Amino acid sequence: MGSTTPAIRGGAARRQGERRRGAVVAALMLAMALAALDSTVVSTAVPQIVGDLGGFSVFSWLFSGYLLAVTVTLPVYGKLSDTFGRKPVLVVGAAVFLAGSLLCAVAWNMGALIAFRIVQGLGGGALQGTVQTLAADLYPLAERPRIQSRLSTVWAVSAVAGPGLGGVLAAYADWRWIFLINLPIGAAALWLIVRHLHEPERETARHARVDWAGALTVFACGGVLLTALVQGGVAWPWLSAPSLTLFGAGLALVAVVVTVERRAAQPIIPGWVWRRRTIAAVNLALGALGLLMVAPAVFLPTYAQSVLGLGPVAAGFVLSVWTLSWPVSAALSQHVYRRIGFRDTALLGIGLGTLILLAFPFLPYPGSWWQPTLLMLLLGGALGLFQLPLIIGVQSTVGWSERGTTTASVLFCRQTGQTLGASLFGAVANGVLAARLGGVGDLDSVTRALDAGTAPEATRRAIADAVHAVYLGAAGAAALAFVVLLLVAPRRFPVLPE
C-alpha cells in the first residue's frame, strides 16, 4: 500500500501540471487573438471614427502607429523575457495593452486616439513575442507543432474576422466597443497567467543589468526607419525633404545602436543573433516571408473587386482561404521535417510558394473567382510548410536564456519585411498604373473611380497588370528566401538536447 502512494501522488501532480499548462495555453490563445484582432479590427470602422472625431488626413496612423509600436518593442521585450522571465513581461505587456484599449475607448479626438493606439502597440509587442516564446517553453520539441499550429489558427481566424467584427460593432453599437471588447478578454487572459503560470527563479534575474540605453536607441532607430518606410510615397514623395531626413536620421541611429550595443554588458540585440548561421538565415528568410505576404494581403482584395467584379464579402473570401490551409499544413509539417530536417522542409515549402506566386500573372483576364482562390489555398499550404519548421527549428537551437531574444528577432524581421513590402509593392503598383494610364492617378484613385463606375475597361486591365507585377515581386522575395536558406542555413539545425 505504501509503495503505491508515491505513484498516486505523482499521477495527481502530473494531472495538476497538465491542468495548469492547459490554462496557460488558453491564456496564450486569448492574448494571441487580441494581438491579431487589433491589427485589423479598426479598418472597417474608419468612416464612423472619422465622422465622430474628425482627423481624416491622419487616420492612417491608427494602423501605422500601432504596428510601429509593436515592431520596435519586440527586441526589447525579447531580451527582458530572457532576463526576468516570461511571466512578468507578459503581465506588464497585457496590462499596458488593456490600459491602451481603455484609453482608446474614451479618446476625444483623432490625435488622442492615435496616441492611445501607440500605447496599445507598446503592450501588443509583449503579447506577440512572449506568447510565441512561452509556447516553446511549455512544450518539448515533439509537441511544439501542436501548440504552434493552434496559435497560427487563432492568429489567422482573428486577423480575418477583425474587419468584419469592427464593421458590425461600428454599425450596430458604437466604434468605441471595438476597444472595450478587449477588456474582458484580456482580463481573463491576465488572470489565467497570474494564477497558473509558474516559472522557476533564474540566476540571471538576480544579477540582471538592463540595457536601457540600448532599448531607447533601438526604439528610436526602429521608429524613425519604419516611419520613413510607412509614410514614404504616401504622406510625402520618396525623394522629398521629410523622407530623406528620416532615412538619414535612421541610418545615423543605426550607427548609434551598433556602438551602444557593443559596449553593453547585456545588450538588447546581442551580436550572436546575426553571427549564428541558423538564426541569421531564419531571420532573413522570415523577413522575406513578411515581404511576400503583402502581395495577397493588400492587393488581392483590390484585384478581386476591380478585375473580377466581386463584392467585398466575396473578395474577402478569396483572400481568407489561405488561412484555412496554412495552419493545417503547419500542423502536418512535423511529419516532413522529422524525415528530412527543418531546412529542407522549409526549402520545399518556399520553393512551392515561389512557383504558385509565379503562376498568378498567368491567370486569364478577367478570369473566374475560383482561379485566384485555388492559388491562395495552395499558397497557404506552401507557407505553412515553410514558416513553422523554421520557427520551431530556430527555437530548438537555443536554451531558455536565449529563446526570448531569438524569437523576438525572428518576429521583428518578419514585421519589418511586411512594412518594407507595403512601401515597395505600393510603389511598384503605382508605377505600373502610371505607365499603363499615361501617368494619371495611383491605385487608390483608380479603384475609387472603378467603384463609382467612371473608369473605362482599360483601367481594369491596368489594375490587373499592376497586381501581376506585385505578385512577380513577391515571387522574387520567395526565391530570395530559398537562396538564403540554401546557402546560409546549415543542412541540419544544431538542436539542443532537452
Image (spheres, grey):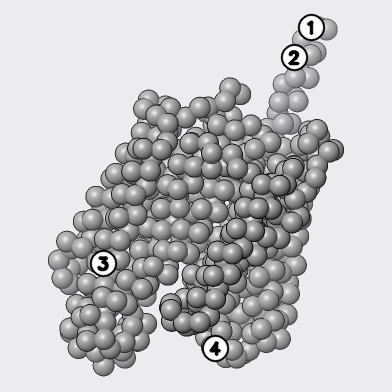
Res 37 visible: no
Residue at the disc numbered 4: 56
- Counting residues from the start of the chain, the first of labels 1 and 3 encountered is 1
Residue in front for this viewpoint, 491 or 467: 491
Residue at the disc numbered 2: 7
Residue at the image position 66 percent from the left and 79 percent from the top: 113
Q: Amino acid at mark 1?
A: Ser
Question: Mark number for residue 3?
Answer: 1
- Counting residues from the start of the chain, the first of labels 2 and 3 encountered is 2
Name the spot of residue 417 as percent of width and height, x first: 46, 58
Residue at the disc numbered 3: 469
Q: Amino acid at mark 3?
A: Ala
Name the spot of residue 148 as percent of width and height, x first: 53, 42
Q: Residues within 10 Å of mark 2 (few under 14, many from 20)?
A: few
Residue in front for this viewpoint, 282 or 96: 282
- Counting residues from the start of the chain, the first of labels 4 and 3 encountered is 4
Q: Name the outermost residue toward the left.
A: 364
Which circle, 2 or 3, is nearer the viewer? Answer: 3
